[in-house]
Image: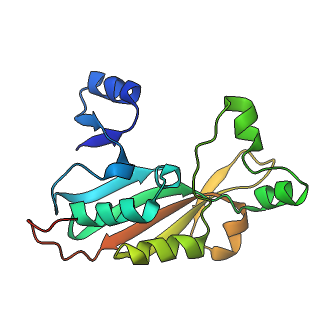
Amino acid sequence: MTGLDFSSIAIERAKGLGLDCQVADLDAGIPFDNSTFDTVWAGDVIEHLFDPVFVLKEVNRVLVPGGLLLCTIPYDLRLTTRLRILLGHSYQEITYKELGQYKHHTFFSIPLLKYMLKKSSLQLQEIKYVIKFPKLKREFISTNRALVYFAKTMAVRAVSKNSYKINNSK
């Protein structure tokens, strides 16, 4: 298992736990050869990228043909966010006030996600939704599209359709 992160602090902590990892700027590409990995896990990463399609193409490049992309992406179009916007509040407001930052560059919808995966030659297999109902301190996972308005996160599985040969360039 190999890990990448933009944060040198996160990498030092991970290395301290004995993990194989390195600092990388994904917006500059993934620093591995073609067809290196069977699976790529990107937990709440894609929304932080300046060019998600480029990085998804890079994911496709480093995956073996038929390899899996597993990722989570915040679902910012849930009902509570829509209501906040309707009432004149930014969907980023709470995070800015609590943490002084908000680094999501892409506001994902399901059609946009599907478009980006297709442009990257990644075939969507499944989206599951992490559902959290307001005021209930309970979460569950569902594939029921009718519940998407309560989803806080999309869990995505896509398969690489890459046909890169080992010496192909990006």
- Is residue 129 in view from this perspective? yes
Left or right, 110 with reference to 35: right
Q: How is the image coloured?
A: rainbow
4 lies above or below 15: below
* Residue 118 horizontal/vertical position (percent): 42, 78
Q: Residue at x 72, y 46 (%)?
A: 92
How many marks the image carries: the answer is 0
Left or right, 118 with reference to 40: right
- Is residue 124 in view from this perspective? no
Q: Residue at x 25, y 32 (%)?
A: 19
Q: Residue at x 41, y 67 (%)?
A: 157
Q: Nearer the viewer, residue 155 or 102?
A: 102
* Residue 3 horizontal/vertical position (percent): 29, 41
134 lies above or below 64: above
In the picture, which quadrant includes the N terminus? top left
In the picture, which quadrant includes the C terminus? bottom left
Residue furthest top as drawn = 16
Left or right, 28 with reference to 87: left
Q: Residue at x 64, y 75 (%)?
A: 145
* Residue 164 horizontal/vertical position (percent): 17, 72
Q: Nearer the viewer, residue 69 or 135?
A: 69
* Residue 133 horizontal/vertical position (percent): 75, 55
31 lies above or below 19: below
Quarter of the image for residue 53 reads: bottom left
83 lies above or below 117: above
Residue furthest left as drawn = 167
Quarter of the image for residue 80 reads: bottom right
Left or right, 116 with reference to 108: left
